[in-house]
Image (tube, helix red, strand yellow):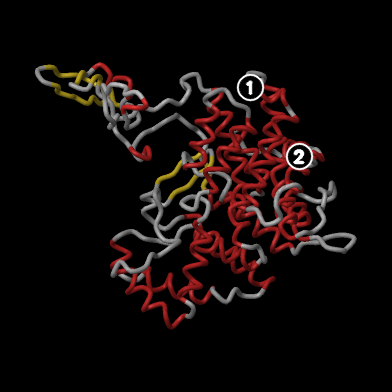
Amino acid sequence: MAKTLYVRSGSEEHELAVTDGTIRASDLRRISTDAGPLATYDPGLLNTASCRSSITYIDGDAGILEYRGYPIEQLAEKSTYLEVAYLLLKGELPNAAQLATWENEVNHHRLVHENAKDIITKSRYDSHPMGKLMSAVASLHAFYPSSRNITDACERELNMVRLLAKMPTLAAFAYRHSLGRNYVYPSDELGFVENFLSMLFKRQERHFIADERLVRAIDVLFILHADHEQNCSTNAVRAVASAGNDPYTSAVAGIAALFGPLHGGANEAVLKMLSEIGSVDRVPEFIEGVKAGQAKLMGFGHRVYKNYDPRARIIKKSADEVFEVTGVNPRLAIAQELERIALNDEYFVSRKLYPNVDFYSGLIYEALKFPPAMFTVMFAVPRTAGWVAQWQEGVLDPEQKITRPKQIYTGLRGRDYAALDAR
């Protein structure tokens, strides 16, 4: 049943069509105010739909996350990351033949130009790996200038695959550069995750063989992080893409947004919190401090989810599998006690503060001996699938226009210029 929003302005009444729970902002322009046409003021775009998308569905109140209609729980249990990347980009899960072709295509593009590698090599050894990754990804446009031809379907496909394939290589190079180790090049004998782990951790052994439990755990983590609707970094990708930019340039905007501690750095904040708590017996004291406003409970609550983050349930199981290989992270007991108390305390339950995906991911990455600076890099690698899928959807959407939000001007007006000697 069609719905209509009635807006009265002075003696005039306006009818605005309601579609999919929204009104078109352009319809508000028909309504005049003393300051000009009516608009909305929405800092952070918390209640503004900026696009139509068929990629990811989230129901935060019910704790539901779906990629192209498939529940995240089923994908994490039964799929691989490259299957999910195919799903995000093409809309359907691949059959066996399509998957084999897809995996071969991605693996074929894992190498990067030596000059792109040199951008990382010439960075300061102690510079942040996300800074190195940003610089290297930005350079890819220079190596593939035809990527600017975004109206060509073949060029779009080729460069999306290139970016998806090369991101783990550049991430691994950034990591090893920070440690002063030699770079490990991609191996055609290894799958996507196995190859990434080899490029990260291989030492002097002739063949690097990753524990299957670690491979599966990272695969699941990558699936969980592949996309998450119109979050800050995805919105950045779409905004830059709206100006007609290629996938590399647009993805750099996503990496930059993800670099922010309020976005990609949340799992690092969880580890810092657990370190400050120090021991299980201090958890009750910390909880009381949170209630009194003296401390922050990191890794709980989410802008979207007002229920248990479905990714958190899955990642908790993956953490157990990782700890079977690496040994239990000593902070795990603190995290488990914190979760137990918070989930049974009315203060947190009434505020719908449940563990999110960041609560356990940091523990996993720390168990794998990653320094905290690498945590956001490990987020950027899988999120590339979502970024290129969202980039493509925006490019092909006939309704999309270059992003240009309005503002409410609060500065001075009508000032007279004074000569330098009169100021």
Q: Is residue 331 above or below residue 56?
A: below
User: Callout 2: few (<14), some (14-19), or many (20+) C-alpha neighbours within 10 Å?
Assistant: some
User: Callout 1: few (<14), some (14-19), or many (20+) C-alpha neighbours within 10 Å?
Assistant: many
Write down the residue under mark 1.
150
Tag nearer the camera, 1 or 2: 2
**Left or right, 9 with reference to 58:** left
Expressed as whole percent of the image width and height from the top left, the position of residue 410 reads 27, 32
Q: Nearer the viewer, residue 289 or 30?
A: 289
Question: First in sequence: mark 1 or mark 2?
Answer: 2
Q: Nearer the viewer, residue 397 or 254?
A: 254
Q: Amino acid at mark 1?
A: Ile
Write down the residue under mark 2.
116
**At 66% across and 41% down in the image, what residue appears?**
135
Expressed as whole percent of the image width and height from the top left, the position of residue 8 reads 14, 23
Q: Nearer the viewer, residue 56 or 196?
A: 196
Name, please, the residue furthest toward the right: 206
